[in-house]
Amino acid sequence: MGPSGPPLVVVCALRVERFALRGDRSHASGPVAFVRTGMGPQAAERAVTAALRDPALDGAAVLTTGFCAGLAPGMRPGDVVVADEPPDGESLAAALKAAGHTVHVGRLAESDHVVRGPERAALRATGAVAVDMESAAMMRAALARGPRPVAAARVVVDTPEFELVRVGTLRTGITAFRVLRDLLPTFLDWHRSTALPWR
């Protein structure tokens, strides 16, 4: 599909996440818009809702990304977590695995604050594999604006064994940044595959 195909909206919360996603978009199947929401579920929901009111983004696929906290033992900084709901994440997980990334598929828990210690273990006990502050809100807002491909892919920045104090100050933060920087081509490939039935 040429550059006039359906648009893709890539949503992240933080300035450092948006900086990591600044790569080449020349092989995109349609227009690509980036939305940086700021931290927290309320900010994320407001920003996505506002962005999708733009008629130019009617029917756009929405992919939410950025960093997350891993909950499962054995996860490593730089692993990628793909939300198992909605089902559009299945094809995204397959594409990321094919690109050589270590991918975990499962539930992304929602929090309004940074999760550490016992709270991390409690969320793991609910069946979640990772937690972040924005993905669930971003996906709710996207689907509220009508049916569309929606997926969430987050890069693990800290784990139960390596808790992060501040993004960018530890080696785990650098590792996660480098992985996020490499994901954009796969995101564009995923978008191309979701657009195929619309030809």
Image (spheres, grey):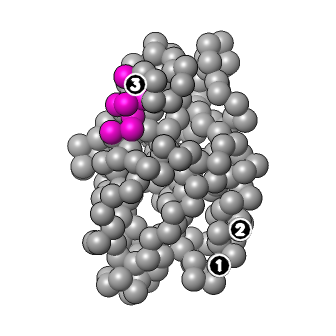
Is residue 36 visible in the rendered structure shown here? yes
Residue 93 bears which disc, if any? none
Type of residue at label 1?
Asp
* Residue in view at x 33 percent, y 40 percent: 179
Q: Quarter of the image holding residue 177?
A: top left
Q: Quarter of the image holding residue 173?
A: top left
Disc count in the image?
3
Type of residue at label 2?
Ala
For mark 1, what is the residue? 54
Residue 50 bears which disc, if any? 2
Q: Earlier in the sequence, mark 1 or mark 3?
A: 1
- 140, above or below 70, in the image: below
Q: Earlier in the sequence, mark 2 or mark 3?
A: 2
Is residue 193 visible in the rendered structure shown here? no
Residue 172 bears which disc, if any? 3
Does the magenta segment cover residue 175?
yes
Q: For numbered disc 1, what is the local secondary structure? A: loop
What is the span of residues highlighted in magenta in the rendered image?
Answer: 171-178
For the N terminus, the quadrant is: bottom left
